[in-house]
Image: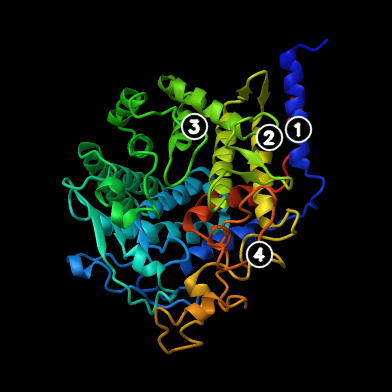
Amino acid sequence: MASPAKAMGAAAAAAMLLLLSTAAVAQAQHNYGDALHKSILFFEGQRSGRLPPDQRVRWRRDSALNDGAAAGVDLTGGYYDAGDNVKFGFPMAFTTTLMSWGLIDFGKNFGSHGGEARAAVRWATDYLMKATATPNTVYVQVGDAFRDHSCWERPEDMDTPRTVYKVDPQHPGSDVAAETAAALAAGSIVFRDADPAYSKRLLDRAISVFEFADKYRGAYSSSLYSAVCPCYCDYDGYQDELLWGAAWLHKASRQRVYRDYIKKNEVALGASDSINEFGWDNKHAGINILISKEVLMGKDSFFKSFRVNADNFICTLLPGISNHPQIEYSPGGLLFKVGNSNMQHVTSLSFLLLAYANYASHANARVPCGGSSASPVVLRRVAKRQVDYILGDNPLRMSYMVGYGERFPRRIHHRGSSLPSVSAHPAWIGCKAGAAYYGSSAPNPNLLVGAVVGGPSNTSDNFPDARAVFQQSEPTTYINAPLLGLLAYFSAHPNLPQSDGTD
């Protein structure tokens, strides 16, 4: 008679294989390289500032060319975060960190797309360097979110206030500052070989920005509540960002001071808190996965506790094993967490699954989950199942990436995409004049190729394709950012084995 532990392991494995096979959904062979190219192209559609001669999203034009002028600084450039025309520093920095992480871990898999991916990172790091050029200051937002959200107008036409918001010693923002330091540190690794001088500038700035974040502690949503909330309020505190920033500085600089900082502050800054979360607001799971590489690669047993946290986190994501109340899977196989824009969880958590699978694979390790365990193959297959769902292997047979496949969202919640382009309609379209386009049932005139929308908002696998339902139809940079690494890996490894022989 099998022991209870063995029986539980067999049941979990059976449930996992059932979901991964998803017999009810037809499986397609996807062109992951094409999807990767389009995912990168999306970022060109989100660019703010003066567009370069090689801009490929031709329906976009220059915008926000005076950003920062009222405060005496140059804050042109960077990315609009989603379907609006505000530049939010917190999600932009996280987007940069995740794009960079994908290039760092899976750079060789990007192939011919590596250059355009690095260009997408550099568009962000160039802006973050401007935003941190003043010592002990980080400019964290450009644009009045409330005024902007009351209008429906093209970024090229916008006439809402371009108010500048910053954190400084009197108005601390350890969360956004430490995430910015992480982004600059990660970017420094990306450009270490391609542009060593630029890489050094990024790392030097990351070090000084992290010192500021750590010295003047506080949440930016306390200092700037009326400006940054509720859009990008820090609901989880700034402690995780301090550990996250230190982890990236340790990886980028290899300075012992950051290693010691991490270990000294592991408990105080809550490394094991909320381990099932990872996104622009909560870095706990990412911290543990990132630092665990040191342990799994045999470089540093000093961080063993982080691997334990990482193992526990990974187990919460595995279908048939996870019984975490905040993790569910839809009948069609989509990972689902309560809240808006579910695809941000799908892409970020899938990226962590893939990254950890690679670390564990190099160490010939498995992930212990109670009475069972999972191999790196299983982790990769769970991540691939999510990517395939996004690309069309779902009950609606619909790709959630604009421009990929025959059927995809046509009415995304995005101002520039839904309004006529400047070339098609040269005349100015004012704040309220855009309402007619917002309320129209017609498809968007401009395809924001590569944009991945928020997707199904519950476990029913339904999607309305309606502009007004922004929770489901709005794309964001931080949905796409982790997807780059995933698509790069699967473009090089499209066919995963069904098992490693021990599952």
User: Which amino acid type is shown beneath numbered disc 3?
Assistant: Ile
Q: Looking at the image, is mark 3 or mark 1 earlier in the sequence? A: 1
Q: Is 213 located above or below residue 120 in the figure?
A: above
Secondary structure under tag 1 reads helix
**Tags 1 and 4 touching, CB below 8 Å:** no
**Tags 1 and 2 touching, CB below 8 Å:** yes
Please tell me the numbered disc located at residue 499. Answer: none
User: Which amino acid type is shown beneath numbered disc 2?
Assistant: Pro
| Residue at x-position 47% and y-position 51% | 99
The residue indicated by pointer 2 is: 319
| Residue at x-position 33% and y-position 54% | 228
Q: Position of residue 252 (x, y in %)?
A: 36, 40
The residue indicated by pointer 4 is: 404
Q: Say which of marks 4 and 3 sits in front.
A: 3
The residue indicated by pointer 3 is: 275
Q: Is residue 353 left or right of residue 416?
A: right
| Residue at mark 4 to residue at mark 3: CA–CA distance | 33 Å
The residue indicated by pointer 1 is: 15
Q: Is residue 459 left or right of residue 149?
A: right
